[in-house]
Image (cartoon, rainbow, N blue to C red):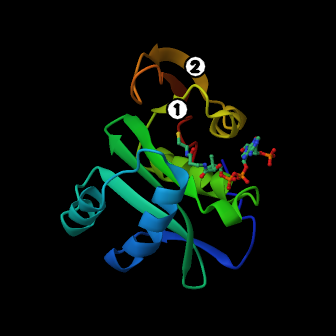
Amino acid sequence: MTTQNPRPDLTFEPMHADDLQQVLAIENQCFEDPWSTLYFRVSLKHPRSYEYFYVVRHERTVVGYIIFCILHEEAQILNIAVSPVCQRQGIGKYLLASALEMIQAAGGREVSLEVDVSNLPAQYLYRQFGFRICGIRKNYYGRYKDAYVLRKGVEADAT
Ligand SMILES: CC(C)(COP(=O)(O)OP(=O)(O)OC[C@H]1O[C@@H](n2cnc3c(N)ncnc32)[C@H](O)[C@@H]1OP(=O)(O)O)[C@@H](O)C(=O)NCCC(=O)NCCS
């Protein structure tokens, strides 16, 4: 899979503590039940070897981020969000393609994630990348808010 950078002025790079304010602003705009400041702060201060926090940056501005983990051959996309003012410009695709490339390079063979059954934009994005529904988690996001479990295989790198 080739990472599609939609614009040469965008970069995909590790998230730093300095990015936190911008990341949290996006997180709070994008989700009804956002991850806590504490979770982000502790995760960045005490990184776990299997967790990856990456941002897409335009100059000094964070426009989106993705968080995923790789445990042996199994990987999971834990969070992805693009600043509302920057959505529909290919940044979500760039984040996901870049993460999948890293997962493949690290030997990941299966990637899974949960998505709200009512979150159609995200589902369309995942479908484009070959994710398919393999289960449902009842009340995953709260009462009557179910999640689909999506999965996709990652082909081994031929090189
Ligand atoms: C899901 C999300 C990350 C997509 O980011 P994005 O930068 O807008 O996505 P892209 O511009 O790369 O679009 C990729 C594809 O997603 C789908 N898509 C994205 N937004 C969409 C919308 N509003 N309506 C329909 N499809 C949409 C389309 O299939 C699109 O491909 P296309 O442009 O070829 O039609 C973004 O909408 C977001 O941050 N949402 C809030 C947070 C969230 O729901 N995260 C997912 C949690 S599981």
136 left or right of 84? left
- Seen at 69% across and 40% down, the residue is 121
Compare marks 1 and 2 and give the one earlier in the sequence.
1
What amino acid does circle 2 point to? Ile
> Mark 1 falls on what kind of element?
strand
- Label 1, label 2: how far apart the Cα atoms are: 10 Å
**Coordinates of residue 48 in the picture (x, y in percent):** 22, 55
Q: Nearer the viewer, residue 150 or 63?
A: 63
| Residue under pointer 1 | 115
What amino acid does circle 1 point to? Val
> Mark 2 falls on what kind of element?
strand
**Coordinates of residue 150 in the picture (x, y in percent):** 53, 26
Q: Is mark 1 within 8 Å of ligand 1?
A: yes
Q: Nearer the viewer, residue 40 or 5?
A: 40
Q: Quadrant of residue 154?
A: top right
| Residue under pointer 2 | 133
83 left or right of 54? right
- Seen at 24% across and 55% down, the residue is 49
133 left or right of 77? right
Q: Nearer the viewer, residue 85 or 124?
A: 85
Q: Farthest residue to the bottom: give it.
A: 59
Q: Label 2: few (<14), some or many (≥20) within 10 Å?
A: some
**In the drawing, what numbered circle is on residue 45?**
none
